Image: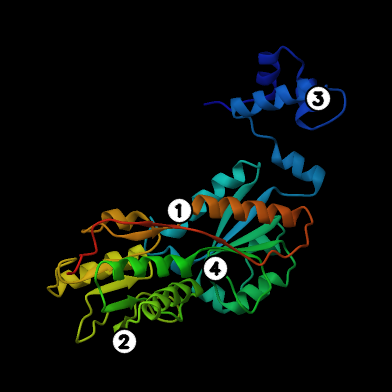
Amino acid sequence: MKNVTMKDIARMLDVSTVTVSKALSDKDGVSAELREKIKETAKQLGYRYNSLAKGMKEGRSYNIGIIIAERYIKDDMDAFYLKMFHNLVKSLSKVDYYGIMDIVSQRDEKELVMPNMISENKVDGVIILGQMNTDYLIMIKNTDIPLVFLDFYDDQLDVDSITSDNFYGAYTLTNYVISMGHREIGFVGNILATKSILDRYLGYYKALISNKIDYHEEWLVLDRDDSGEYIDFKLPEKMPTAFVCNCDSVAYLFIRKLKKMGYKVPDEISVVGFDNYIYATLSSPRLTTVQVDMEAMAEMATHEILSKIEGDKRVFGRKVISGNLIIRDSVKKLN
Protein backbone atom coordinates (compact mmCIF):
# COMPACT_ATOMS: atom_id res chain seq x y z
CA MET A 1 0.00 0.00 0.00
CA LYS A 2 1.45 3.36 -1.04
CA ASN A 3 1.86 6.15 1.50
CA VAL A 4 -0.99 8.67 1.59
CA THR A 5 0.14 12.17 0.57
CA MET A 6 -1.30 15.66 1.02
CA LYS A 7 -2.10 15.59 -2.68
CA ASP A 8 -4.35 12.55 -2.12
CA ILE A 9 -6.24 14.39 0.62
CA ALA A 10 -6.52 17.55 -1.50
CA ARG A 11 -7.87 15.58 -4.47
CA MET A 12 -10.48 13.85 -2.34
CA LEU A 13 -11.77 17.12 -0.85
CA ASP A 14 -11.30 19.20 -4.01
CA VAL A 15 -9.01 21.74 -2.32
CA SER A 16 -5.41 22.77 -2.93
CA THR A 17 -2.40 21.00 -1.42
CA VAL A 18 -1.46 24.31 0.20
CA THR A 19 -4.82 24.36 2.00
CA VAL A 20 -4.25 20.82 3.26
CA SER A 21 -0.76 21.74 4.46
CA LYS A 22 -2.05 24.79 6.33
CA ALA A 23 -4.83 22.80 7.96
CA LEU A 24 -2.55 19.98 9.12
CA SER A 25 0.01 22.50 10.41
CA ASP A 26 -2.66 24.60 12.17
CA LYS A 27 -1.71 27.71 10.19
CA ASP A 28 -4.02 30.64 9.45
CA GLY A 29 -5.97 30.85 6.20
CA VAL A 30 -8.29 27.86 6.67
CA SER A 31 -11.71 27.95 8.29
CA ALA A 32 -12.23 25.91 11.45
CA GLU A 33 -14.84 23.73 9.71
CA LEU A 34 -12.59 22.93 6.74
CA ARG A 35 -9.57 22.39 9.00
CA GLU A 36 -11.49 19.77 10.99
CA LYS A 37 -12.74 18.12 7.80
CA ILE A 38 -9.19 17.89 6.39
CA LYS A 39 -7.80 16.42 9.62
CA GLU A 40 -10.61 13.87 9.81
CA THR A 41 -10.03 12.83 6.19
CA ALA A 42 -6.28 12.55 6.82
CA LYS A 43 -6.95 10.31 9.79
CA GLN A 44 -9.36 8.08 7.83
CA LEU A 45 -6.84 7.67 5.00
CA GLY A 46 -4.05 6.78 7.40
CA TYR A 47 -1.96 9.88 6.63
CA ARG A 48 1.00 10.39 8.96
CA TYR A 49 2.44 13.82 9.57
CA ASN A 50 6.05 14.35 8.57
CA SER A 51 7.37 14.02 12.10
CA LEU A 52 10.93 14.90 11.08
CA ALA A 53 9.96 18.25 9.60
CA LYS A 54 7.52 18.90 12.42
CA GLY A 55 10.16 17.94 14.97
CA MET A 56 12.77 20.29 13.47
CA LYS A 57 10.27 23.13 13.69
CA GLU A 58 9.30 22.40 17.29
CA GLY A 59 12.66 21.14 18.57
CA ARG A 60 11.41 17.59 19.14
CA SER A 61 12.16 14.17 17.72
CA TYR A 62 8.64 12.75 18.30
CA ASN A 63 10.35 9.60 19.55
CA ILE A 64 9.89 8.00 22.98
CA GLY A 65 12.58 5.67 24.25
CA ILE A 66 11.32 2.42 25.79
CA ILE A 67 14.08 0.79 27.84
CA ILE A 68 13.87 -2.89 28.79
CA ALA A 69 16.42 -5.07 30.62
CA GLU A 70 17.57 -7.95 28.43
CA ARG A 71 16.74 -10.54 31.11
CA TYR A 72 13.01 -9.92 30.68
CA ILE A 73 12.89 -10.96 27.04
CA LYS A 74 15.98 -12.97 26.09
CA ASP A 75 14.48 -16.41 26.75
CA ASP A 76 11.00 -15.85 25.41
CA MET A 77 10.07 -14.08 22.18
CA ASP A 78 6.45 -14.08 23.36
CA ALA A 79 7.50 -12.38 26.59
CA PHE A 80 5.04 -10.34 28.64
CA TYR A 81 7.16 -7.22 28.23
CA LEU A 82 7.28 -7.55 24.44
CA LYS A 83 3.49 -7.58 24.47
CA MET A 84 3.51 -4.52 26.71
CA PHE A 85 5.96 -2.83 24.29
CA HIS A 86 3.56 -3.48 21.41
CA ASN A 87 0.76 -1.86 23.41
CA LEU A 88 2.98 1.15 24.06
CA VAL A 89 3.87 1.56 20.39
CA LYS A 90 0.20 1.36 19.47
CA SER A 91 -0.76 3.93 22.10
CA LEU A 92 2.05 6.31 21.10
CA SER A 93 1.17 6.08 17.41
CA LYS A 94 -2.29 7.48 18.18
CA VAL A 95 -0.63 10.75 19.19
CA ASP A 96 1.91 10.72 16.32
CA TYR A 97 4.86 9.52 18.41
CA TYR A 98 7.15 6.59 17.75
CA GLY A 99 8.31 4.11 20.39
CA ILE A 100 11.96 3.07 20.09
CA MET A 101 13.10 0.02 22.07
CA ASP A 102 16.52 -0.15 23.71
CA ILE A 103 17.41 -3.51 25.25
CA VAL A 104 19.96 -3.11 28.05
CA SER A 105 22.30 -6.02 28.71
CA GLN A 106 23.10 -7.09 32.27
CA ARG A 107 26.68 -5.89 31.75
CA ASP A 108 25.64 -2.43 30.54
CA GLU A 109 23.19 -2.16 33.43
CA LYS A 110 25.89 -3.07 35.94
CA GLU A 111 28.53 -0.80 34.38
CA LEU A 112 26.07 2.10 34.04
CA VAL A 113 26.33 2.47 30.26
CA MET A 114 24.01 5.26 29.14
CA PRO A 115 21.65 4.30 26.25
CA ASN A 116 22.68 6.00 23.00
CA MET A 117 19.16 7.25 22.44
CA ILE A 118 19.54 9.44 25.54
CA SER A 119 23.19 10.51 25.16
CA GLU A 120 22.61 11.44 21.50
CA ASN A 121 19.31 13.26 22.20
CA LYS A 122 17.28 11.01 19.92
CA VAL A 123 14.20 10.87 22.14
CA ASP A 124 11.94 13.40 23.85
CA GLY A 125 11.22 11.19 26.85
CA VAL A 126 11.83 7.73 28.27
CA ILE A 127 9.57 4.96 29.59
CA ILE A 128 11.45 2.29 31.52
CA LEU A 129 9.57 -1.00 31.23
CA GLY A 130 10.32 -3.41 34.07
CA GLN A 131 12.44 -2.96 37.17
CA MET A 132 16.16 -2.26 36.78
CA ASN A 133 19.13 -1.65 39.08
CA THR A 134 18.56 1.48 41.20
CA ASP A 135 21.96 2.97 40.30
CA TYR A 136 21.10 2.63 36.62
CA LEU A 137 17.75 4.33 37.20
CA ILE A 138 19.46 7.16 39.10
CA MET A 139 21.85 7.68 36.18
CA ILE A 140 18.95 8.12 33.75
CA LYS A 141 16.95 10.30 36.15
CA ASN A 142 19.94 12.62 36.55
CA THR A 143 19.81 13.47 32.83
CA ASP A 144 16.53 15.32 33.58
CA ILE A 145 14.86 13.73 30.57
CA PRO A 146 11.07 13.27 31.01
CA LEU A 147 10.79 9.87 32.65
CA VAL A 148 8.07 7.36 33.63
CA PHE A 149 8.39 3.86 35.12
CA LEU A 150 6.00 1.22 33.79
CA ASP A 151 5.08 -2.01 35.64
CA PHE A 152 7.35 -1.21 38.58
CA TYR A 153 8.31 1.50 41.05
CA ASP A 154 11.41 2.34 43.06
CA ASP A 155 11.05 3.53 46.66
CA GLN A 156 14.39 5.34 46.51
CA LEU A 157 13.47 7.52 43.52
CA ASP A 158 10.87 10.22 43.15
CA VAL A 159 9.78 9.07 39.69
CA ASP A 160 6.18 8.66 38.57
CA SER A 161 5.15 5.07 37.85
CA ILE A 162 2.26 3.02 36.52
CA THR A 163 1.75 -0.50 37.87
CA SER A 164 -0.87 -3.20 37.90
CA ASP A 165 -2.60 -3.79 41.23
CA ASN A 166 -0.20 -6.52 42.28
CA PHE A 167 -1.08 -6.52 45.97
CA TYR A 168 -4.87 -6.63 45.70
CA GLY A 169 -4.74 -8.92 42.66
CA ALA A 170 -2.74 -11.55 44.55
CA TYR A 171 -4.92 -11.05 47.63
CA THR A 172 -8.05 -11.74 45.56
CA LEU A 173 -6.42 -14.69 43.84
CA THR A 174 -5.33 -16.30 47.12
CA ASN A 175 -8.75 -15.73 48.66
CA TYR A 176 -10.25 -17.62 45.72
CA VAL A 177 -7.91 -20.56 46.38
CA ILE A 178 -8.94 -20.47 50.04
CA SER A 179 -12.63 -20.37 49.06
CA MET A 180 -12.03 -23.64 47.19
CA GLY A 181 -11.16 -25.28 50.52
CA HIS A 182 -7.35 -25.00 50.54
CA ARG A 183 -5.62 -24.26 53.87
CA GLU A 184 -2.07 -25.27 52.89
CA ILE A 185 -0.89 -22.75 50.28
CA GLY A 186 2.65 -21.97 49.12
CA PHE A 187 4.08 -19.14 47.01
CA VAL A 188 6.43 -19.40 44.02
CA GLY A 189 8.74 -16.44 43.37
CA ASN A 190 11.81 -14.63 44.65
CA ILE A 191 10.44 -11.70 46.63
CA LEU A 192 13.83 -9.92 46.45
CA ALA A 193 13.97 -9.95 42.64
CA THR A 194 11.35 -7.28 41.83
CA LYS A 195 8.89 -5.02 43.62
CA SER A 196 6.05 -6.62 41.65
CA ILE A 197 6.83 -10.08 43.00
CA LEU A 198 7.16 -8.69 46.53
CA ASP A 199 3.77 -6.94 46.30
CA ARG A 200 2.12 -10.10 44.97
CA TYR A 201 3.67 -12.07 47.82
CA LEU A 202 2.37 -9.53 50.36
CA GLY A 203 -1.13 -9.83 48.88
CA TYR A 204 -0.88 -13.62 49.23
CA TYR A 205 0.39 -13.26 52.81
CA LYS A 206 -2.42 -10.88 53.78
CA ALA A 207 -5.00 -13.38 52.50
CA LEU A 208 -3.49 -16.06 54.76
CA ILE A 209 -3.57 -13.75 57.77
CA SER A 210 -7.13 -12.57 57.04
CA ASN A 211 -8.31 -16.18 56.93
CA LYS A 212 -6.26 -17.24 59.99
CA ILE A 213 -4.17 -19.67 57.95
CA ASP A 214 -0.66 -20.52 59.10
CA TYR A 215 2.27 -19.37 56.96
CA HIS A 216 5.04 -21.89 56.26
CA GLU A 217 8.37 -20.43 55.17
CA GLU A 218 9.41 -23.76 53.63
CA TRP A 219 6.55 -23.35 51.12
CA LEU A 220 8.17 -20.25 49.63
CA VAL A 221 9.73 -21.68 46.45
CA LEU A 222 12.30 -19.59 44.54
CA ASP A 223 11.90 -19.25 40.78
CA ARG A 224 14.93 -17.01 40.06
CA ASP A 225 18.02 -15.58 41.74
CA ASP A 226 18.23 -12.01 43.06
CA SER A 227 19.44 -10.72 39.67
CA GLY A 228 16.38 -12.14 37.91
CA GLU A 229 17.96 -15.21 36.27
CA TYR A 230 15.64 -18.24 36.38
CA ILE A 231 16.71 -21.23 38.46
CA ASP A 232 15.35 -24.74 38.93
CA PHE A 233 12.56 -25.12 41.47
CA LYS A 234 13.42 -26.87 44.73
CA LEU A 235 10.26 -28.47 46.06
CA PRO A 236 9.68 -28.78 49.83
CA GLU A 237 9.63 -32.23 51.43
CA LYS A 238 6.04 -31.80 52.64
CA MET A 239 3.96 -30.27 49.87
CA PRO A 240 0.96 -27.96 50.37
CA THR A 241 -2.26 -28.52 48.42
CA ALA A 242 -1.88 -25.33 46.36
CA PHE A 243 0.66 -22.77 45.13
CA VAL A 244 0.23 -19.12 44.15
CA CYS A 245 2.80 -18.30 41.43
CA ASN A 246 4.04 -14.75 40.80
CA CYS A 247 3.26 -14.91 37.05
CA ASP A 248 1.77 -17.18 34.40
CA SER A 249 5.07 -18.14 32.77
CA VAL A 250 6.43 -19.32 36.13
CA ALA A 251 3.17 -21.18 36.85
CA TYR A 252 3.48 -22.91 33.45
CA LEU A 253 7.04 -24.05 34.24
CA PHE A 254 6.09 -24.99 37.79
CA ILE A 255 3.27 -27.25 36.58
CA ARG A 256 5.71 -28.97 34.22
CA LYS A 257 8.06 -29.51 37.17
CA LEU A 258 5.26 -30.95 39.31
CA LYS A 259 4.19 -33.36 36.57
CA LYS A 260 7.80 -34.43 36.06
CA MET A 261 7.97 -35.25 39.78
CA GLY A 262 4.81 -37.35 39.50
CA TYR A 263 2.21 -34.92 40.90
CA LYS A 264 -1.22 -34.50 39.27
CA VAL A 265 -2.42 -30.92 38.71
CA PRO A 266 -4.94 -29.96 40.01
CA ASP A 267 -6.01 -33.29 41.51
CA GLU A 268 -3.11 -33.37 43.98
CA ILE A 269 -1.77 -29.83 43.82
CA SER A 270 -3.57 -26.72 42.56
CA VAL A 271 -1.62 -23.88 40.87
CA VAL A 272 -2.57 -20.28 40.00
CA GLY A 273 -0.69 -17.61 38.07
CA PHE A 274 -0.80 -13.86 37.44
CA ASP A 275 -1.00 -11.68 34.25
CA ASN A 276 -3.46 -13.72 32.10
CA TYR A 277 -0.78 -13.90 29.43
CA ILE A 278 -0.26 -16.55 26.74
CA TYR A 279 0.92 -19.23 29.19
CA ALA A 280 -2.40 -19.11 31.03
CA THR A 281 -4.11 -20.89 28.14
CA LEU A 282 -1.10 -22.89 26.92
CA SER A 283 -0.86 -24.53 30.32
CA SER A 284 -2.51 -27.87 30.99
CA PRO A 285 -4.66 -27.42 32.95
CA ARG A 286 -5.50 -23.86 31.91
CA LEU A 287 -4.54 -21.39 34.61
CA THR A 288 -6.72 -19.49 37.01
CA THR A 289 -5.02 -16.10 37.09
CA VAL A 290 -5.36 -12.31 37.34
CA GLN A 291 -5.69 -10.36 34.11
CA VAL A 292 -3.36 -7.37 33.81
CA ASP A 293 -4.85 -4.55 31.72
CA MET A 294 -1.81 -3.87 29.53
CA GLU A 295 -3.71 -1.58 27.19
CA ALA A 296 -4.84 0.71 30.01
CA MET A 297 -1.33 0.74 31.49
CA ALA A 298 0.21 1.66 28.11
CA GLU A 299 -2.32 4.45 27.54
CA MET A 300 -1.68 5.83 31.02
CA ALA A 301 2.10 5.77 30.46
CA THR A 302 1.65 7.55 27.12
CA HIS A 303 -0.51 10.24 28.69
CA GLU A 304 1.91 10.85 31.54
CA ILE A 305 5.12 10.95 29.46
CA LEU A 306 3.53 13.41 27.01
CA SER A 307 2.39 15.61 29.89
CA LYS A 308 5.99 15.76 31.11
CA ILE A 309 7.30 16.55 27.64
CA GLU A 310 4.78 19.42 27.48
CA GLY A 311 6.31 20.80 30.68
CA ASP A 312 3.98 19.54 33.38
CA LYS A 313 6.14 19.46 36.52
CA ARG A 314 3.54 17.91 38.80
CA VAL A 315 4.38 14.59 40.45
CA PHE A 316 1.53 12.09 40.41
CA GLY A 317 3.47 9.37 42.24
CA ARG A 318 2.23 5.84 41.62
CA LYS A 319 -0.88 5.04 39.59
CA VAL A 320 -2.34 1.56 39.95
CA ILE A 321 -4.39 -0.15 37.24
CA SER A 322 -6.80 -2.80 38.53
CA GLY A 323 -6.97 -6.33 37.14
CA ASN A 324 -9.65 -9.03 37.07
CA LEU A 325 -9.76 -12.57 38.43
CA ILE A 326 -9.98 -15.13 35.60
CA ILE A 327 -11.18 -18.54 36.78
CA ARG A 328 -10.18 -21.58 34.74
CA ASP A 329 -9.25 -25.19 35.51
CA SER A 330 -6.12 -25.23 37.70
CA VAL A 331 -7.72 -25.19 41.17
CA LYS A 332 -9.44 -28.26 42.63
CA LYS A 333 -12.28 -27.76 45.09
CA LEU A 334 -11.58 -29.60 48.34
CA ASN A 335 -14.29 -30.95 50.60
Residue 300 position in % (x across, y down): 60, 53
Quadrant showing the C terminus: bottom left
- Going 67% across and 63% down the picture, which residue do you hit? 147
Q: CA distance from mark 3 to mark 2?
A: 68 Å
Which of pointers 2 and 1 indicates the residue nearer the eye? 2
Q: Nearer the viewer, residue 112 or 300?
A: 300
* Amino acid type for the residue under numbered disc 3: Ala
> Which type of secondary structure does the marked residue at label 4 adopt?
loop
Name the residue that disc number 1 marks: 83
Which of pointers 4 and 1 indicates the residue nearer the eye? 4
* Amino acid type for the residue under numbered disc 4: Phe
Residue 159 position in % (x across, y down): 67, 69
Establish if 303 lies above or below 251. above
Name the residue that disc number 4 marks: 152
* Amino acid type for the residue under numbered disc 1: Lys
Q: Between disc 1 and disc 3, whose residue precedes?
A: 3
Task: Give neighbour class at mark 1: few <14, some 14-19, many 20+ (Cα, 10 Å).
Answer: some
Task: Give neighbour class at mark 3: few <14, some 14-19, many 20+ (Cα, 10 Å).
Answer: few
Q: Between disc 2 and disc 1, whose residue precedes?
A: 1
Name the residue that disc number 2 marks: 216
> Which type of secondary structure does the marked residue at label 1 adopt?
helix
Establish if 71 lies above or below 93. below
Q: Are marks 2 and 1 in contact (CB under 8 Å)?
A: no
Establish if 233 lies above or below 140. below
Q: Is residue 58 left or right of residue 93?
A: right
Q: Going by the picture, which residue comes out furthest to the top?
A: 14
Task: Give neighbour class at mark 4: few <14, some 14-19, many 20+ (Cα, 10 Å).
Answer: many
- Going 66% across and 75% down the picture, which residue do you hit? 157
Q: Going by the picture, which residue comes out furthest to the right?
A: 28
